[in-house]
Image: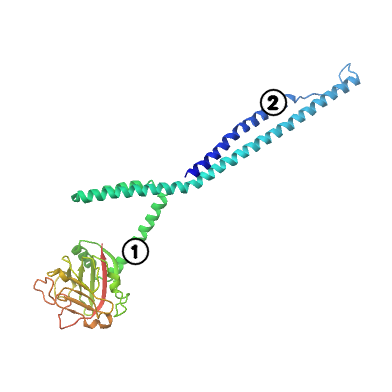
Amino acid sequence: MEELINKNNQLIKEVVETLPNIQQSIDDVNNNYQSYLESIKNEVFELKENETYSEAIKRGEGIFDRMDETERRRKLVIEKSQETINQIEIMKNKISKIIEECNNDEETFGKTRNELIDKIISIEEMIMKDKLFRRTEETDTITSEFNKKKEEWKKHYSDYLERKKRKEEEEEKERKKQEEERLQIMKGMNSMEEMRQIEEWTNKKVGNVLFESDVDDWNKNTSVFDQKIKNKEHIMIVIEDEEGNKFGGYVNSKIDEVESCITDQKSFLFSLESKGRMKRMMKFDIKEPRCAFYLNSQTDDCLFEFGFGHDICVFKENNKTQSYCYQRSFEYNGISNALCGKQLPERFTQKRIMVIEMK
């Protein structure tokens, strides 16, 4: 930055030093031009009455000499004017150089400005976190206050309009993506009521589709199911079997391990379509949360399991006829065959599996 300042100061100094030369040139042009104007006379050369020829010739020679002087002065005005133009051109080039340097400085200053804003926002965030730690009951107010300050600072970015445009484009892209995923989810639902019911049960909105059995591999040894849902939370697994039952389960906790029980007090199972066994969609809360969900590995025969008593056990695609329900770890309120319409030792065959991330 210091080098930049010295460079620009030198340019300004050169411009200032050029000013007296330009002023002197302008004064010279003015003086010579006035002298030139004074020398211009419209003298008529004719033989005067009582004037001898010799006198007339002498007078004509005088007029001729004065015309030579006028021509000399005219050329001098042009010469001095050109010198002035040259001096002005030199100054113009120096000032143009200053403009060029200032234009080049825009990126440097913009970057410095933006870095300062980022640091201020970072400190504001630290202040917010400190407030949240000390005043947990005011979480929403403190967070809202921080977001407001953050947005105000962002308006001072040197490229704010470009950033705003990019953000709007990204938001629009994300909105379209979510809309496409929502349409994909709706294809897996018989009605909007099913989607609304899921959102009501979880108190969250339908988000991304993490896994779709019609598209993703779920065969033994090659399945991507575990990769798709590992380290995810708030996931809804919807199963549709070949007899038209639609049921599944919700995992609220983070699925951070494979082949390990996930404890989850907020997990539940549900039935969206029971082929007339129940009059409405039903939710079944967990009784034994210590093994609410179990994610099997890629090499296992099973894909996943809900409940310590294997309330739902779904096998991989090449063994999908072995899947079963066994009501034990959730509260079914006396309803038998609530999920797939049968229980172990009878089996069901899944037609489709969809995993939705709730937001």
At label 1, the amino acid type is Lys
Q: Left or right: where does residue 142 sit relative to residue 111?
A: left
From the viewer's perspective, is residue 82 above or below residue 67? Answer: below
The percent position of residue 121, horizontal first and vertical second, equals 33, 48
The percent position of residue 25, horizontal first and vertical second, equals 65, 31
From the viewer's perspective, is residue 256 above or below residue 117? Answer: below
Q: Report helix, strand or loop for mark 2.
A: helix
From the viewer's perspective, is residue 210 above or below residue 123? Answer: below
Quadrant assignment for the C terminus: bottom left
- The residue identified by callout 2 is 34
Asked which quadrant contains residue 343, the reply is: bottom left
Specify how the rendered protein is coloured. Answer: rainbow
Q: Report helix, strand or loop for mark 1.
A: helix
Q: Is residue 138 visible?
A: no
Q: Residues within 10 Å of mark 1 (few under 14, many from 20)?
A: few
- The residue identified by callout 1 is 177
For the image, the number of numbered tags is: 2
Numbered badge on residue 311: none
Q: Is residue 58 visible?
A: yes
Q: Residue at x 51, y 46 (%)?
A: 103
- Quick one: 253 or 170, which is closer to the camera? 253
Q: Residue at x 42, y 47 (%)?
A: 112
At label 2, the amino acid type is Gln
- Quick one: 278 or 33, which is closer to the camera? 33
Q: Residue at x 74, y 31 (%)?
A: 74
Q: Left or right: where does residue 343 sit relative to residue 354?
A: left
The percent position of residue 29, horizontal first and vertical second, equals 67, 30
